[in-house]
Structures are given as C-alpha cells and as structure tokens.
Image (cartoon, rainbow, N blue to C red):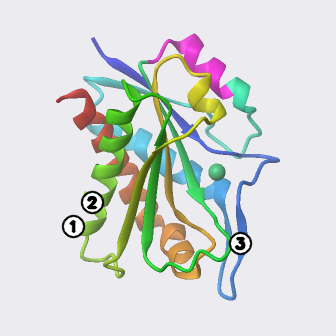
Amino acid sequence: MRTKIMLDAGHGGKASGTVHQHPTIKVVEKEINLKIALYARRYIKQNFLDTITPYITRLHDDTVSLRRRCEMANLKDVQLFLSIHCNSRPQRGKHGVEIETFYQLEVPDKPFALRIQDTLVEGLRESVWVETPIIYRRVAEANFYVLRNTFMTSALVECGFLCDEEEALFLSKERTQRQYGKWIAKGIYSFLND
Ligand SMILES: [Zn+2]
C-alpha cells in the first residue's frame, strides 16, 4: 500500500510569511516554501511513486487558512503531514544555514521530525556547492496549529533564516530549492523504509 503525504507549503496569497528587504535581494517566505514543496512533490513523483502518493496544500500563490490545511490532510486520510517554512528572528547574530524541525508528540512525530532534519543537514554537508560550512540544527517540541490539528504523524521544518542576507540569498536560489525538495523527499522515503 502506498503512503499518502500532505506537503504543506507554508503561507501563500495574502499571508506572505516573513518578508525581508536586504540591500541586494527581497525575500518573501511564501514563495520559497512553495518552490521547495513543489520540488519535493516532483521528486517523490519521479522516484518514489510506487510507495508514496504526494499531496500538496497549495499549488499556487493562494491564501489557504491553517484550518483548511489541516482539513485537507484529515479528509485525504494521509499518513504523514509536513509543513515547510523559512524562519526569521531579529538580531539573530548567527551566520550559516540553520535548520529547525518541530514536532508535537514524542511518538510518532519526533522520529519523523528527526529524519527530515537529518536528511537536510546531511544533504547540506555533502554539497560542495554550499559555500557556508556552518550548519546549525535544532529539533524541538512545539504546539503549532497545524501539528495540533492534523491527526497523523506530522512535523514542521524551518529551512533557514531569511533575516540573514547570505542565507536568504542561498534559499532564494532555484538550485537550493530543488535540492531541499529532493532532500525532504528522501527524508520522507527513508522514514518510511526504516
Ligand atoms: Zn512561516
């Protein structure tokens, strides 16, 4: 039997998520989230379609409420839910890529969050084209709406910090988004095939 996953591209439409205007680039979180989610979906379709059926909460720049995202996952009766976001924190004072993954329950959510996190970090480490060798990581419990209101194994990944210009530039690149999508897809597959 195939496992169904709902990929949730955070924000969209009227909800931009975090927005940063740097000297060289303006970054809008909703756009990056969507690209990464679409690349993850494409990678699953191309490589794991015999075992995973991917769904997505939005295909375009649409406004989708948090409640609707959860309903979509619950109604489709998916086994996994992964929300994809990018982060922001004033006066962060760190340089490098920082991946954070959140879960609500120790079981079964935490192992899923850890696997997504590990696959992303591993992918970043192995990529010679990633200029920054510094990768921060954090897996933590969080009581987010989409984790609380989805009835299946769920996690929320923050793919990096858009408040940092260097990191924002990195995340805005098509290549980065494609790789992130691939790593997320591989993380899902490896979690299911343990
Ligand atoms: Zn967000």
Q: CA distance from mark 1 to mark 3?
A: 28 Å
Q: How many marks?
A: 3
Q: Position of residue 15 (x, y in %)?
A: 78, 48
Mark 1 crowdedness (10 Å alpha carbons): few <14, some 14-19, many ≥20: few
Q: Which residue extends farthest right?
A: 14
Is 171 located above or below residue 73 in the figure? below
Evaluate if marks 1 and 2 touch, with contact meaning CB atoms under 8 Å apart: yes
Task: Determine which residue is flagged by label 3.
Answer: 20
Residue 38 seen in this snapshot: no
Q: Secondary structure at mark 2?
A: helix
Residue 138 seen in this snapshot: yes
Q: Earlier in the sequence, mark 1 or mark 3?
A: 3
Q: Residue at x 25, y 23 (%)?
A: 50
Q: Residue at x 40, y 50 (%)?
A: 181
Q: Position of residue 168 (x, y in %)?
A: 56, 73
Q: Which residue extends farthest bottom?
A: 23
**Going by the image, does 154 lie left or right of 148?**
left
User: Callout 3, which amino acid?
Assistant: His
Q: Secondary structure at mark 1?
A: helix
Residue range corresponding to the magenta coloring: 69-78
Check the picture and name the quadrant holding the N terminus: top left
Evaluate if marks 1 and 3 touch, with contact meaning CB atoms under 8 Å apart: no
User: Callout 1, which amino acid?
Assistant: Glu
